[in-house]
Image (cartoon, helix red, strand yellow):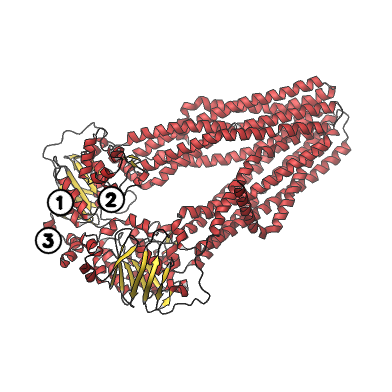
Amino acid sequence: MDKKKSAQKETLLKVLKYVRHYWPFLILSIAAAAVTVVLTLYVPILTGEAIDYIIDKGKVDFVHVFGTLQKIGIVILLTALAQWIMNVSNNKIAYHTVQDVRNRAFQKIQILPLKYMDDHSYGEVVSRVIADVDQFSDGLLMGFTQLFTGVITILGTLLFMLTRDMGITLVVVLITPLSLFVANFIAKRTFVMFKQQSEARGEQTALVEEMIGGQKVVQAFNYEEEALEHFDEINEKLADCSLKAIFFSSLTNPCTRFVNSLVYAGVGLVGALSVINGGITVGQLSCFLSYANQYTKPFNEISGVVTELQNALACASRIFALIEEEPQTPEPDHAENLEHTDGKVDLEHVYFSYSPEIKLVQDFNLHVQPGQRVAIVGPTGCGKTTIINLLMRFYDVDSGSIRVSSRDIRSITRKSLRGSYGMVLQDTWLRTGTIRDNITMGKPDATEEEIKAAAKASHAHSFIKRLPKGYDTEITEDGGGLSQGQKQLLCITRVMLCLPPMLILDEATSSIDTRTEMHIQEAFAKMMQGRTSFIVAHRLSTIREADVILVMNNGNIVEQGDHRSLLEKNGFYARLYNSQFLSGQDMADNGSGRSAHSQR
Amino acid sequence: MRKLLIYMKDYKKESVLAPLFKLLEASFELLVPLVMARIIDRGIGNGDKHYVTIMCLLMVSLGIIGLVCSATAQYFAAKAAVGFSTKLRHALFSHIQGLSFTEMDTMGTSTLITRMTSDINQVQNGVNMVLRLFLRSPCIVFGAMIMAFTIDVKAALIFVVTIPLLSVVVFGIMLITIPLYKKTQAALDRVLGITRENLTGVRVIRAFNKEEEEKERFEVSNDTLTAMQKHVGKISGLMNPMTYVIINGALVVLLWTGAIRVDTGYITQGQLIALVNYMSQILVELIKLANLIITITKALACANRVESVLEIQSSMQDADRKSPEKAKTGSPSVEFRHVGLTYKNAGEESLTDIDFKAEKGQTIGIIGGTGSGKSSLVHLIPRFYDVTAGEVRVNGVDVRNYPIHELRQKVGMVLQKATLFKGTIRENLLWGNRGASDEELWRALEISQAKEFVDKKEDGLDTEVVQGGKNLSGGQKQRLTIARALVKNPEILILDDSASALDFATDARLRQAIGNLKDRMTVFIVSQRASSVMYADLILVMEDGRLAGAGSHGELLETCSVYREIYESQFESRQEEA
């Protein structure tokens, strides 16, 4: 518990660090809040005073009434002003803090090691950057103001009441916490019901997902009625749980309202008796009555505010965890740019694994001469992307070294290393923007002719031309309107345009029809001429023409050599080969399995 | 929304009683200031302590009655809302189940799931709130005004001016901000989009060294978002100060008028206090009402989405006829007559002029590249889609003349995507035939080459399959889905590229086992592997939705260039090696 407290405190301090930039607004906000509360409390007093000047027929002191009303008028305007200042400052603090935190989080994403992305689902990270940040700004800043004004209100009313009448104050102080107690009582009781409800709801959602997701099977097997029966069963259960949870939780408001009316009646009783005994005036009684309402309000809200604050802190700690995540190894100060590489790549004694318990690549040596082709083959999920991860330095080797043009890739800038590779992954990724934006990613200053030439070379030009706005057609996130094959063509065009000295190709043409595939093969072949290429190969022709074949299994490089020598060896490669796994279409069938692994 | 109201039908009583009790509660609440006025005027005025005590007890009893009324109202509201949403969920689920593949394709399953779950929850919440509050808040506002009239007409006129003024401010600000909030949401979505994109495309972004550019892009949209939020915040930040000024301004006027009225003896001091109390009740309720309207707007949007799903009619009409006349003996098991298929919203035909006959007991292989129309073709046999040209016949009868259930009973379909459901292996297999014995199940498993691995499982047929079959490998799932179809003992078995995760040898054994079945079914094998179809009686070669060739392996090798191309790309090189 203490640990949790101190963690919360730590998070709070971190939040304050962000808020600190806006300290003038923070001070303004706190001051305005204080002014608002005090003035709000002052109005009932003034009203009471005014009422005391309005006693009965013919007994109205108009001069004093007018004077008091003038005061009220001024107080009202001041309060409104203070409220407005408070709102504006709060907005400023909240939204700018959120903006800063989001920017920081996003900047972090850009320098996080890929391991982080591979280990965390996208949804999780997105929800931290979007939902958690929102929740924390809303909860924390609004919760804070509410808590602050609530406390001031309670203290203020208490103070005012105490100076006027002990008896009434006692009534208020004693009865009001009842509402807190009742609210808590109900919350505790309903907690279980809500849990049951959310369980039932979860069960139902799972069923709906299963049955609607698998509707084709459901219909193929005439299973509709059974599914509906099963659904109804859960639906009834959910209805049961929901009714209980909703009903019992909805008792909170009437109950606290009842407690408030008790307070009101109590104040009325004690106050009226006190008036009769000459303790207070009628105006003061009316003031007490309105205080009774104001005093109870923060009490009714307080439990909600505390939960919200805790919730907000939890969200804040999640977002800070992201921001404070260890970034990728920074580049050394003297990191040089890799220029005009010849395409010589050497891997020496490379050891690598994603997690220490599972050893993957061990003592791997590979020497690729400029212009050579390296084919990477192996069954589905064998970890072919591991090699890409290492070459592109998405991951660092555990020990050993990778050298490009005889220079350790850790001594050169990531930018220049990655710039020397042209990469086409099976996982076709396009970003929102026009087709042109996507093609020119690697060469932003490309001319129209260059773009068209590249698109023609990759056989993308003809379909782009037919799009409503040609090269300026907007594509939505993840390529929306385009077919998988078209997306793949665009990714190839992207590399065609900048043509770096080395290539990494995931030769997955699974989504492209046979004709286009043949064209793409031609394009690939043209691209590879004179360039060192690493190809995750599925086609026999590619594999056989490769200078080096890396055979992978279970994340390990199990064999390497050229086609003939590997066959002669009669090992894993030969077995794979003979079991026809290498048939041109095989990998295509396993597309889904592969993409899951491509994250690795 | 109107269409959804029929699901309220069974809860008429509750939906009347809930607001009614709420109104009762509200009227009791309205009495409180009057009682307080009495205390001040008569109790304090006459120094009557007994009267004061009685009146205070009356207030407590008003509170108790209010509590009872409101608890009753909450119960009826909850009952009506939950009952309504339960009925609605049932109706929606059963409606969705009746939709054909065409509608499923256009709507998308994820949309439908959202409609079923979170949207209906929102609607339920909305109904609940409406029943509870929609009458209460206006009633208190107008009730307070009427009470004011009963006290003093002239003073009450202040209420008549204040209430509309307040309403204009509260609802005006709301009307202005709601569309702005929507815009802000859109801006937030863009920020979300960029974040997602950067996560999914992290490799490409880093490969192209786009980190800095992406940061800038993010900051620009983040700036836009913040600017919008601040803009909306400024407007909605006006709400509190403005309402405060209006209500308290009215209070000042009320006190001044009250002073005059008291001075002339029209009203008493206590009545003035009551008027002041009514004034403050109004503000609270108007703000509640404004919040309620936001909830209702959301719920209405969700209700409309749910309704739009309910409005979709299945494009597939079930045959009225009980059963088609007995099929003529000797008619082919499956026959395509110049079939064309254009998917909804697609411009071009996906299948064009497909024409072939499959005799009973034959094995038909269908081969072609991705997107060549292989799956579309076999999906027409169990009438997952309706043809847009020509006709498909099963046992000599147009599939549209069968009751859909009867037709699908004849067809065992194994889809490309191996879908299993939560439950035991047995439960999954029983989908094919509810009454199948264990023996039959094992036989099906044996044919589908799944016997071995099910045998190895500790619980055998009772092994639990988790949702989505995630505890099984792709190949295991495929073999189980094949077994499921075999349990059905169908006349026609369709394997839609469903052996892709099997290795060559298992695939071959599977085909052999199916071929060896006693009462031979008509088997359709869709594949990208030439090896899977080459022994079929008839091979259909698909290209761009057309039949590029039909015949036996030998015939096609000679006559069909597409087939030769496919075959050679898969075999030629191996033979060279060998």
Q: Which mark is residue A126?
A: none
User: Which image quarter holds the C terminus of chain B?
Assistant: bottom left
What SS does tag 3 mark? Answer: helix
Nearest the eye: B204 or B502? B502
Q: Which mark is residue B475?
A: 2
Q: Tell me: residue B527, above or below residue B316.
A: below
Q: Amino acid at mark 1?
A: Ala
Q: Tell me: residue A384, above or below residue B170.
A: below
Residue B493: quadrant of the picture: top left
Q: Amino acid at mark 2?
A: Gly
Disc 2, disc 3: CB below 8 Å?
no
Q: CA distance from mark 1 to mark 3?
A: 16 Å
Q: CA distance from mark 2 to mark 3?
A: 34 Å
Nearest the eye: B350 or A135? A135
Q: Position of residue B212 (x, y in %)?
A: 51, 67
- Left/right of residue B524 with respect to residue A357 in the rendered view: left
Q: Is residue A187 visible?
A: yes
Q: Position of residue A345 (x, y in %)?
A: 37, 75
Other residues around mark 3 within 10 Å, as few (<14) / some (14–19) / many (≥20): few
Q: Which mark is residue B536?
A: 1
Other residues around mark 1 within 10 Å, as few (<14) / some (14–19) / many (≥20): many
Q: Chain of mark 3?
A: B
Earlier residue among tags 2 and 3: 2
